[in-house]
Image (tube, rainbow, N blue to C red):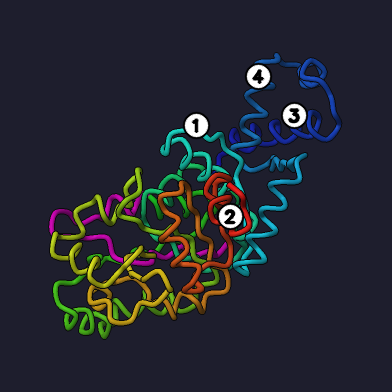
Amino acid sequence: MPDARDEQQLQRAFTAAHLYYIQNRTMEAVAHELATSRSTVSRLLALARSAGIVDIRITSPREAPAQLEARLSEVYDIRAFVVPVAGDLSEEERQERVAIAAAHTLNDMIGPGMTVGVAWGSTVAALSRHLVPRHAPDTVFVQLNGSGNTRAAGLVYATEILHRFGAAYGGAVEQFPVPAFFDDPATRLAMWRERSTRRILDLQARMDLVVFSVGSAGAPVPSHVYSGGYLEAADIEALRRDRVVGDVATVFFRADGSSEGIALNERATGPRLADLRRVQTRMCVVSGVSKLASLRGALAAGLVTDLVIDEVAARSLDPDSAE
């Protein structure tokens, strides 16, 4: 809980933001009214933005992005949010810009009492660093899939992501302390009967919202499942034979969205695609054209209801685009 000094500072930030953004006062006028300096007003406005007191929304003056969002929404039966980015950005910079936009979009989706599933990965990790703080009482954030492998427990990586969500929204976090993949499908079946595991699975069955990206082996910013020691050479070869194009929460699928007969899925700890489809809101965050094959597979599987994507990748995804 914030102490009295923090509350007082937040109240000053609120007053400064109201004077500047709502009453259209200049920085000098705000500083004069609050009997402080311009630099202090600037810091108060920054605090108001970081604390979620100020929610800045930008509407493009161009028709093209809005038309692109409308086309993607119509073609794929989703809500599309296209993030304008320069074409010469590095893949890392592009991912960061999309993550920032996704964090603001997510803020409109999360409400009190919701159960939110979170899939770990490089894109969701970037998103978690830009979450806009807002109190959402009784919210629970549950890990979608295990994070351990034969080289590391993976707990620190997944824990950091989950706890950023919990801290931003004042919610509880529930980890899933199992490996990403079991060695034997029979082990998974046995673990799924354990009461401690069933508690997490029952939470996942009540999810109102899931947040994820799509995994892709060939992305310039490698998906963590491919770069973090989770897959052996034999696993990679098996995925190639099964014509896999990507994954969501370490559950793999083909270009047509099918997942049946993919051997590695029998050992995976992520939710089955049919279970994901039962969640009302499924937010997917993607940056870069290198993930388009995986994204198309996820769309074909019906895994996405809301898509946040950079403009360059969105134009490649649009079947009507001339580019």
Q: Earlier in the sequence, mark 1 or mark 4?
A: 4
Q: Position of residue 154 (x, y in %)?
A: 24, 55
Which numbered dot is residue 106?
A: 2
Tag nearer the camera, 2 or 1: 1
Badge 1, how many Cα within 10 Å: few under 14, some, many 20+?
Answer: few
What secondary structure is marked by label 3?
helix
Does the magenta-highlighted stretch encompass residue 57? no
Instruction: Give the class, few, some or many, for how many residues have Cα within 10 Å of label 4's Cα (few <14, many ≥20).
Output: some
Question: Which comes before the other along the chain, label 3 or label 1?
Answer: 3
Q: Which residues are magenta?
A: 137-160
Per the model, the C-alpha gap separating discs 4 and 2 is: 30 Å
Query: Nearest the camera: 317 or 5?
Result: 317
Question: x%, y% of residue 171?
Answer: 50, 58
**In this view, which residue lies farthest toward the right?**
23
Residue receiving disc 4? 40
Q: Which mark is residue 88?
A: 1
Q: Are marks 3 and 1 in contact (CB under 8 Å)?
A: no
Q: Residue furthest front?
A: 322
